[in-house]
Image (cartoon, rainbow, N blue to C red):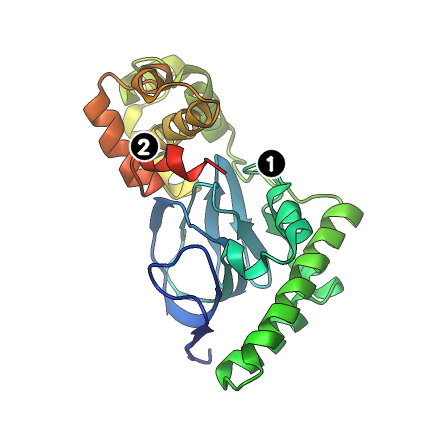
Amino acid sequence: MEKKIIKHGNHKPGNDTYGYMYNFNTSDNYDFNSHLHSCYEIIHIIHGHLLYTVEGSEYILDDGDIIMTKPSELHSFSFPDNGKYQREFLHIYPGFLDKYPEIIKGLNSRKAGYFNRIPKAEVEKYGIDRIFREMERWCAEPREETDFMMLALTLQLIGTIHCIQRCETPQHQNVVTNKRNNAVCDYIDHHFREDISLATISDSLFMSQSHMCRLFKREMGMTIKAYLAMRRIRNAKNLIMQGQPITSVYTDSGFCDYSTFYRTFIKYAGMSPDEFKKSQIP
């Protein structure tokens, strides 16, 4: 596998409102805890097999797939196997497209956690891979026209994605295929507001706790405790966006005390509850 690193853009660190950043790199597999970006992220998987979780929806990604998230989407990823991970991605900060409000509107039209994946077949059918090749070419050897060309290619990329979403059957692929793991997820989804534990779940599903945890970790790429925390934080985010006071959000999301809720929110959302609330104000 060719190892190369390309990084170019006009985004300035510390300014989360303007610019773009293109990045092509290769690394060893690693897990990334749930987090949010202040930008739109579109990732093209060159090589790798991974589990990508967006707002509770789990996608299996392979060579050639696209995965995309918007600023409000909590996401994480993990790898079931060791190996090299090669990808290219484009970060688009809102101000980079401020002259094209319809494009921004289109980027925000997806429901959180839905239709994040574009499979390789559609990536190639609609030429998204070719658009990324042009981005790579302009960013590998930046010149005076690079920023202008990246704007044009970004508009072409987003327009093509809109076309796919309109013309193709959306690929909202839940990859929790193991029946027992489905049962674990279903139990958590229905009981996360309660004071539940690994023992509670295993007893309810008539499973050995150790076997349940091993199976879940192998199939999902995360622990049951992490999934439970993510489910609770996703609910908390929704309540905050609905205008519910933060002082009552934590109890309605299954947390026994505010300090635990606060620490967990920062861990999985990358910001405090108050900062998240402010980020949702237009």
Q: Position of residue 157 (x, y in %)?
A: 66, 63
Q: Viewer-proximal residue, 6 or 12?
A: 12
Q: Which residue is mark 2?
A: 274
Asked if the residue under mark 1 is in contact with the one under mark 2, i.e. CB atoms within 8 Å, the reply is no
Determine which of the numbered discs, if any, sits on residue 60 in the image.
none
Question: What kind of element bears circle 1?
Answer: loop
Q: Residue at x 39, y 32 (%)?
A: 277
Q: Position of residue 245 (x, y in %)?
A: 36, 19
Q: Residue at x 40, y 53 (%)?
A: 79
Closer mark to the observer between disc 2 and disc 1: 2
Q: Looking at this view, name the residue that lies furthest to the right.
A: 167
Tell me, yes or no, if residue 42 can be seen here: no
Q: Position of residue 90 (x, y in %)?
A: 51, 63
Tell me, yes or no, if residue 78 can be seen here: yes
Q: Residues within 10 Å of mark 2 (few under 14, many from 20)?
A: few
Where residue 148 sits, quadrant-wise, is bottom right
Mark 2 residue type: Asp
Q: Is residue 113 above or below residue 253?
A: below
Where residue 7 sits, quadrant-wise, is bottom left
Question: What kind of element bears circle 2?
Answer: helix
Choose the circle earlier in sequence order: 2 or 1: 1
Q: Is residue 26 left or right of residue 264?
A: right
Determine which of the numbered discs, if any, sits on residue 111 in the image.
1
Q: Residues within 10 Å of mark 1 (few under 14, many from 20)?
A: few
Q: Residue at x 55, y 37 (%)?
A: 112
Total count of labels? 2
Q: CA distance from mark 2 to mark 1?
A: 23 Å
Q: Position of residue 126 (x, y in %)?
A: 74, 63
Q: Residue at x 62, y 40 (%)?
A: 110
Mark 1 residue type: Lys
Q: Viewer-proximal residue, 45 or 139?
A: 139
Q: Viewer-proximal residue, 82 or 113?
A: 113
